[in-house]
Amino acid sequence: MEELDIIHKRIKDFPLFSGLERTQVFFLLTYLDARFEVLEKGRMVFPLAKTIDSFALILGGSVELAQYDYWGNRSIILTQEAGESVGLPSSLFEDWVPPAGVVVRSRCELLFLKAAKLRASEALV
């Protein structure tokens, strides 16, 4: 339970959890199949050229959204830091392949959540 308390303190200010009681946050984390991961610099957060069904809250570190051309050259589109989310828009659309990759810029602590459960057709009633 101590681990959940630590995560609660770190995520309570994210808009998704804003205004929720501690027990409601834990219920939502369970419902969204929350998974905590630490990734080192250079790792891919989401696989390239594949659909994604989760998004991540950046609890520490930073990531880069990058596009790769035919020759493997990388163009950085955006850098995201702790306190932001990554992959949410891409994960909400079923069978959609995001046009950019997400690469860890500095050691990153991420909380992955299943976006499919946020879709209206699958949400709790």
Image (tube, rainbow, N blue to C red):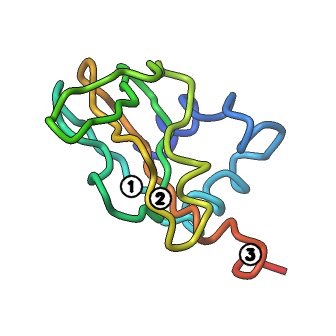
Q: Nearer the viewer, mark 2 or mark 1?
A: 2
In the rendered image, which quarter is residue 28 located in?
A: bottom right
Q: Position of residue 76 (x, y in %)?
A: 36, 21
- Residue that label 1 marks: 35
The residue at 27%/54% (across/down) is 47
Quadrant where the C terminus sits is bottom right
Q: Position of residue 73 (x, y in %)?
A: 19, 27
Alpha carbon separation for disc pair 2 and 1: 10 Å
Question: Would you place residue 100 above or below residue 52 in this image?
Answer: above
Question: Would you place residue 5 above or below residue 34 in this image?
Answer: above
The residue at 30%/43% (across/down) is 45
How many labels sit on residues? Answer: 3
- Could you say whether the residue bearing mark 3 is in a helix, strand or loop? loop
Which mark is drawn over residue 64? none
Sequence-wise, which precedes: disc 3 or disc 1? 1
Q: Mark 1 and mark 2 in contact (Cβ < 8 Å)? A: yes
Indicate the amino acid at tag 3: Ala
Q: Is residue 42 left or right of residue 27?
A: left
Q: Position of residue 23 (x, y in %)?
A: 69, 55
- Residue that label 3 marks: 123
In the rendered image, which quarter is residue 119 located in?
A: bottom right
Alpha carbon separation for disc pair 3 and 1: 19 Å
Q: Residues within 10 Å of mark 3 (few under 14, many from 20)?
A: few
Indicate the amino acid at tag 2: Ser
In the rendered image, which quarter is residue 117 located in?
A: bottom right
The residue at 73%/56% (across/down) is 24
Q: Position of residue 68 (x, y in %)?
A: 27, 36
- Could you say whether the residue bearing mark 1 is in a helix, strand or loop? strand
- Residue that label 2 marks: 54
Question: Would you place residue 94 above or below residue 108 in this image?
Answer: below
Indicate the amino acid at tag 1: Arg
Residue that sits furthest to the front in the current view: 70
